[in-house]
Amino acid sequence: MVNTATRQTRALKFLKVGLANAKNALTSATSQAELDAAYQSLVTIVNSKLKNKEKAVTETEVAATEKTEATTGKPAENTKPAEGTNAIANTGKNDPRNGKEIDKNTAFRADTATATGIGADVVDATSTPKEAKPGFTTNIKAADLASQISWLDFGDTANWTGTTTTSDGKLALQVGATYTKEIMPGYVVTIKVKSLKPFQATEIYKKRLEDRGATAAEKATYDPNARNGYVSGSSDSTTKAAFAAGEEAKVIAEAQNRWTEVRTEGINTGTKKTTISSDLNGGNIGVQFEVSATFRGKVVRPAVVMADGESANPGEVVMFTTNGEGWQHIGEWYKNGDKSTRTYAPQDLTYYFDPANNFSYHKPVPVEGIDIRNWNTQQLRDSTQAGPDKKAVAWKYFQSADLTTAGLGTGVFGPNVSASKFAVPLVMTKGASEIGLYIASSGKQSAMFGFFPLDEGDAPESYGKAIHSIATVDGITGKKVNQPYLGHLSPDMDENNALDWTGDDKTTTADEGIDQLLPNDLKGKTNELIKMDRTKPGNYTITVEAHTDGAPQANIYGWVDFNQNGTFDEDERSDLATITKDGAVTLRFTKSKTYIDPSVNELGVRLRIAKDAAQIESPTGMAFSGEVEDFQDSNHSPTKKEKSKKQLVLKVPNKQQP
């Protein structure tokens, strides 16, 4: 029998030969099929030469030794092609790409999963929307939401390191530039610039070219080394000079201005430098940010909010990318209260830039029945070159495949029309380690970026997600925000929890310990029990501690999964409880249609508190204040005394306190 060292030596020999063959194929191949065959050969080596059982390897080696002379020049039996497959010996004859010339301007990539370029881990939109397009936000004022978001401010110069400046002294980004700030007590966020490249340098753009049937000339516009720069079609004289000189566009931020129409919806950041753009008009730019955060010393994945910093006309492109959860719509409002405002419209760049349509300032672009007159469509369409290297860009591939929502629920959102009668949406992503921002316009287009502190429930997925914003510092004014909460501990940063009832309890301060939920007279005396008093069949009460944190009042709803069907039903909700001061509050469940045996176990419970009762009427969805507490009882049989008092006892495992 061959020993382990010998097997390893021979396995390495096989692998080295395979790698050498693949290298030769990479330099000499004239078709995609040859590259595919080389790749499959490597796969075969890994699967058969390196992973076979010891006995099989030994027998194969002996047989090979005996038959060396007789089999020279013959195909190995294990490479015989299976009929109708693209196996190695078929050399790609069943591959629909067979015979096509390799694109000399496209880097070889054997498998999408191995790609490492910009945006390689981002899930792009498809023509089938992942979500329905929401309407306008009516249950929260934009100004109230804006105060919950900590907006990235280039004016916070003390929080930036590694930046550069423009010729007129404005702070500008460069690779490695880092922003670190404690945006509320205990919550520290960090943003680091990973790359500064436009959209045509991304894997997203490259894959769109491949998937949408781009021509050879269009495919050649993918350039992983492209640099931020300016477009050739801009009419701005300063931009024309910068383009001619091959200047690289610097990324800066300025205060909102009269074109920042999200301000007319109520998102007003005042004099803060929150709108990110190129230094001059006509920028074709991109920024890839690494994002991270800690809360009370422990690592969390922050929630990030983005929006157009200026309203976008047709042909003014703004896109956001994330490698976290897909973009979620969190707000959109009437401009200046005008109810004739339309919800945002995804940009159909293929239509806008079709030369046959010849849209220009003199021929407005029709968008959902509204004619929008602007120079941007014509000037970006006529920009045959972009960037310091003056290369072509296929602008229509900046368009989302999803022309219904522009990519909600996916890793790429935008571009949209948000000018004229169209609103500017706010979108959010959670769990991301990288966020991308891409802009292309003949004018001055911009975007806004903010952090959104959240508390989330940790009930299993079937119960639905409840989310609360919990910022304690106003993101605009810096003043304290009153945040009501349950128990004697303020909520922790419960983002990206495991959905197993205990996800919060394994993070940060474990604010959901049952003892901390109880009134003072019961703390330390319940053995981590919550007792639901049954006043009569179907009617129960729970008493917990709640705090207003200085707010005029707070509202509380609770849900108990009495029928244990894995959801919180309407008749399982408590009556509304409203408090105006700190202390004990009793939740009354008077609508339950289910008679509960006092010995029942494993009931799921959700409690929600917020300043606005309307935002927590449902067990799921987002509220812009307060917190959510999810917990579940474990097996416990009531005592005779408890049964005599007609109590349903919920017991939750001990939870670590700070």
Image (cartoon, rainbow, N blue to C red):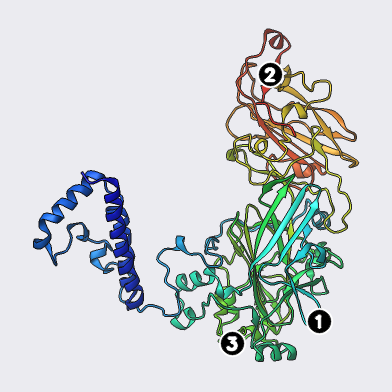
Q: Secondary structure at mark 2?
A: strand
Q: Earlier in the sequence, mark 3 or mark 2?
A: 3
- The residue that disc 2 covers is 648
Horizontal and vertical percent for residue 56? 21, 47
**In this view of the protein, which residue sits in the foreground, 599 or 530?**
530
Q: Is residue 319 above or below residue 548?
A: below
Kind of element beneath mark 1: loop
Determine which of the numbered discs, if any, sits on residue 307 in the image: none
Amino acid type at image mark 3:
Lys
Task: Name the front one of labels 3 and 1.
Answer: 1
Q: Which mark is residue 168?
A: 1
Disc 3: which residue: 390
Rendered residue at 29%/54% (across/down): 9
Residue 229 in the image, given as x and y percentages of width and height: 65, 81
Which callout, 3 or 2, points to the residue nearer the camera? Answer: 3
Q: Is residue 124 left or right of residue 506?
A: left
Q: Quadrant of residue 336?
A: bottom right
**In this view of the protein, can residue 338 be seen by the observer?**
no
Q: Amino acid at mark 2?
A: Leu
- Above or below, 567 against 361 in this view is above
State which tag comes first along the sequence, 3 or 1.
1
Of the 4 image quadrants, the one containing the N terminus is top left
- Determine crowd level at label 3: few under 14, some 14-19, many 20+ residues with C-alpha closer than 10 A: some
Q: Position of residue 586 (x, y in %)?
A: 81, 26
Q: Are marks 3 and 2 in contact (CB under 8 Å)?
A: no
